[in-house]
Image: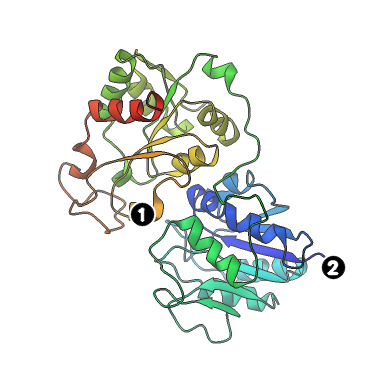
Amino acid sequence: MTERILVVRLDSDGDVLASGPAVRAAAAGRDGSPAEVTILCGPSGRQAAEMLPDVRRVIEWSCPWIVASPREVSSADIHALVERLAGARFDVALVLTSFHQSPLPTALLLRLAGIPEIAAISADYPGSLLDHRLRPGEDMDDDQPEPLRALLVAARAGFALPPGDDGTLRVTTPEDPMHITGEESYVVMHPGASAPARTWSPHRCASAVTALRQDGHRVVVTGSPSERELTSYVAGTDGVDLGGRTPFPVLAGVLAHADAVVVGNTGPAHLAASVGTPVVSLFAPVVPARRWAPFGVPVRLLGNQEAACAGSRATRCPIVGHPCLNSVTARDVVAAVNSLVREP
């Protein structure tokens, strides 16, 4: 029988994209025959989940111990999820979490849904909630890129990447963006992020667009519908404003055709990595770059990684002047882009 695998990743697009290699390992199966993979994800990760290869089905659930603005815990909501998962009769669950998240509340729900085999990383004693446990600092080095961390969970349950799979991030074929980008080559500037602490100042983004244009690069500026005012300002007269015009599959196409992408630590950075495009990463050190820098593509990391905010996980910068990123200049960005685009 084909095994039914549930991969759980309940936070944002970037987190879900980083789980892609583990999903492919699960889909390869354990007995030489492919498995059927379903992803359980949160609302802010669904669009990424729907673009991962080898995913048969996506189940969306807003998890009150994971999402940034959680609703009250509801017994009706919990029971509905448990019943839905029980009805799917999963054989194995891989619970993927970041270092600061516990898999155990989720594992409890999966047990109640009758899932007989569960794997996760857990610093806390899991009792009978986990069948396959990885202990940070004992069974594994917890300080490694997130995709590799997820692959360790899959491996503990007996799953491995199929032959020829290099373990990089991937998405299904993105949409052709030429109707909005034109055919000339370009660099992408993506100025927004869900956490203000991870954004470069808008006026510095705008200055970088001008500097890139002066250096001979055509620049397109991307952002969500809620960021149209920001993208319009950043694009100015020197960039092409695509704010609000790039649903996730289209954004993947825009990034795939770019020479390079200038972006903070946010979902589109990992989407760029998923389509194989080099990244200039404006990385605020509120989380470690060694875990969350774009994976598997050439990267130029900008920003003071030793700033006082390092490791704070702050969503709003706790230091006056945002020095970790505002120490970066437009010329720094131009030099970083050129090192990716123009040098062999």
Disc 1 + disc 2, Cβ < 8 Å:
no
Give the number of the mark in front: 1 or 2: 1
Relative to residue 135, is residue 279 depicted above or below?
A: above
Amino acid type of the residue tagged 2 in the rendering = Met
Residue 112 falls in image quadrant: bottom right
* Residue 60 visible within the image: no
Looking at the picture, how far across and down is residue 121, in whole percent? 49, 72
Residue depicted at 17% across the width and 49% down the height? 319
Residue at 20% x, 37% y: name it. 326
Q: Is residue 278 visible?
A: yes
Mark 2 burial class by Cα count in 10 Å: few <14, some 14-19, many 20+: few
In the rendered image, which residue does mark 1 sit on? 290
| Residue 328 x, y percent position in the rendering | 22, 35
| Element marked by disc 1 | helix
Identify the residue position indicated by label 2 in the image: 1
Locate the N terminus and report the quarter of the image it occupies.
Answer: bottom right
Using the image, determine if residue 185 lies above or below residue 255.
Answer: above
At mark 2, the secondary structure is loop
21 vs 286, nearest the viewer: 21
Q: Nearer the viewer, residue 246 or 274?
A: 274
Kind of residue sitting beneath label 1: Arg
Residue 298 x/y as whole percent: 42, 39
